[in-house]
Amino acid sequence: MSTAADKVAATGNGTTSLYHNKAAQWLLYLAVFAVLALMPLLVENAFTLNQLARYTCFAILAMSVSLVWGYGGILSLGQGIAFGLAAYGMGMTMQMQYQHPEYDPIPSFMLTNELESLPLMWAPFWSTTTGLILTLSVPTVFFAVFGAMMFQARVAGVFVAIMTLAMLAAWYSMAYDMQPFTAGFNGISPPLPFSIGGFELDPYGAPAYLVCVGFLAVLTCLAKLLMQSRFGVIVQAIRDDAERARFLGYNVASYQIALFAISGFIAACAGLCWVMIVQYVSPTSLELTLSIAMVIWAAVGGRLSLLGAIMGAFLVNGMQSYLGDELQQLWMLFLGAIFIGVVLLLPRGLAGLMELILDRLAGLRGRSQDQASGQKEAAE
Amino acid sequence: MSMLELTGVTKTFSDFVAVDNFDLTVEKGELRCLLGPNGAGKSTSIDLITGRLKLTSGTVKLDGQVISGLSEHSIARLGVGRKFQVPAVFKELSVEDNLLVAATKVKSPFSNMFTFSPRIGSRQARFEQVVDLIGLKDRMRVQAGILSHGETQWLEIGMVLMDDPRVMLMDEPTAGMTEQETHKTSELFNNLKGDHTLIVVEHDMSFVREIADIITVMHMGTNLVEGTIAEIETDPRVTEVYLGTEGIGDA
């Protein structure tokens, strides 16, 4: 009966390896965010800084996928819904900052679409504060309602992926077709950068970049705290066996709805930052490929680790920027190959690899071997 | 007043009657064994009591309160705990976290977002007591997925105990256990009865002999015979149900 698992227990007090040491984890998280925050000192080139800000937005998205999929077991292919809705909200807010209530009350694309007055949907965006509140709250509320529909009906597994995918496609068509309201395929390009409190955030400047990093750092730390709370443990329990949790008295749907809405809020923050950085929004933010790419970033980095997913986003997008130029269309093939490789060889992504290495360094055998010996033992 | 009372419980799946007008009364502190050949409706009855399946007709009362028709989590919160036939634990979590999830009395997601302590306050004493009882004390940091089959069974029993339900429904708790482990389980169950009300579905007759006061034999979804082990073993109707074997003793 003596297995590697006994050795795990023998090291005592839960200090199994550095990977599982909570203090070490927090230190690493803070170090990564500190490095990101210091980048403007190292990077002189405004284009590169803007590129980094974009990756930071993608990192926020990958982190939201890790939360909902890695921890919650909910494979959402619709994270782009929250991202896209928030992107439009931010785009509308920025567009209305440019408009003048008396001299120029209607965005020009509406005039070419023969609208004579500002649509009701746009009116609240005259106020930047209201605009920002709507930008973040509408996607969150939508995710809560959509989540309630799915999880109270006990939709699970691959069916969640299909439903979220279908919903994403519906929003995409809507953004595309509502030309007078969204400028359709062309998208909205606010003429001026986002300004708040009289301060203009130049998309290529350090302050805008730091806002993105700030969002990433704060959201990740909050998400990590949340996963360390009792809520986080229960959410993972539900991922492992929803039925078991239900018969221990947990309302499984309420946990899933809460987690789904939180992940929607995080993806919405990414949408807000994104439009601030690119000063443009179009239906591409609601495209299928983007939402699937988020899942790939999280999988490559390791969906069971928030930081892993963040690293995955930086890594894959960094590679795309440099290799994508070289390989052109071949890049997609390359990305697909990476994804398949990760799924087959590293189901826990790069973070899982790190875990394996640190566990071995700590003189323990890897988890996969433990499982194998555990199964053998069970069979005997 | 009886702890659990089933009256005329019926469950049909289109044309098939799985449980047919089943009556069962279990007193407080009693340990009741549920026997019967495959397809007799034992597991279906447990699903009906716990709310996993909805009754076609009839009522289930817990301590006088009608619980049939409530959701699974509401029934669980009122004090009905169950162990699954195929042991169900949270495989990716540590043994400790498995027990912690079971021991948490606060079930609302929002209050649990602000709970960080791995301790459970006033219930800590019970927590340690259960850990001792199931003998997994030095396996607490181990991932539940790598436990042996017997240990997994014990963990799930521990989770049910941790929740401290008024009625415990145990679906084949000794399946896959060694003789020694089975014996330990029977000792545990004998300790539990009196304070807790238990319903145990079992096939292992030696185990049933060790624990049972009264046995209910189910057949074709209904209550065939009820009585002590001696009465059951000599009852001709029971022998007939288990036809093809030499009576229930060897089942």
Image: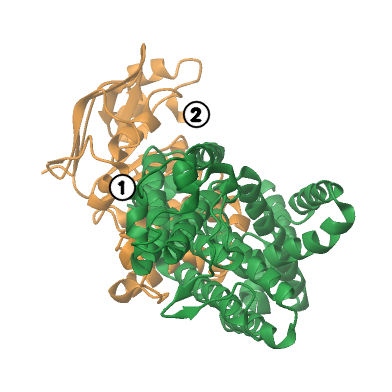
- C-alpha distance separating marks 2 and 1: 38 Å
For label 1, the crowd category at 10 Å Cα-Cα, with few meaning under 14, some 14 to 19 and many 20 or more, is many
From the viewer's perspective, is residue B19 above or below residue A328? above
Q: Residue at x 67, y 84 (%)?
A: A40
- The single residue placed furthest to the front in the displayed view is A103
Check the rendered structure and report the hue given to chain A: green
Q: Residue at x 33, y 62 (%)?
A: A102
Q: Which mark is residue A359?
A: none
Q: Residue at x 31, y 47 (%)?
A: B73
Find disc 1 in the rendering and name its residue.
B73
- Both labels 2 and 1 in a single chain: yes
- The single residue placed furthest to the bottom in the displayed view is A41
Q: Amino acid at mark 1?
A: His
- How are the colours assigned in the image? by chain
Give the SS element for disc 1: helix
Q: For residue A119, say whether it is visible.
A: yes
- Counting from the top left corner in percent of width and height, residue A174 is at 48, 39
From the viewer's perspective, is residue B142 above or below residue A294? below
Find disc 2 in the rendering and name its residue.
B250
- A32 lies left or right of A159: right
For label 2, the crowd category at 10 Å Cα-Cα, with few meaning under 14, some 14 to 19 and many 20 or more, is few
Check the rendered structure and report the hue given to chain B: orange
- A296 lies left or right of A153: right
Q: For residue B155, say whether it is visible.
A: no
- Counting from the top left corner in percent of width and height, residue A206 is at 62, 81
> In the figure, residue A209 lies in which quadrant?
bottom right
Depth check: give the residue in front, B175 or A323: A323
- Counting from the top left corner in percent of width and height, residue A155 is at 45, 38
- Counting from the top left corner in percent of width and height, residue B45 is at 33, 31
Name the chain letter of the residue that bears numbered label 2.
B
Depth check: give the residue in front, A3 or A178: A178
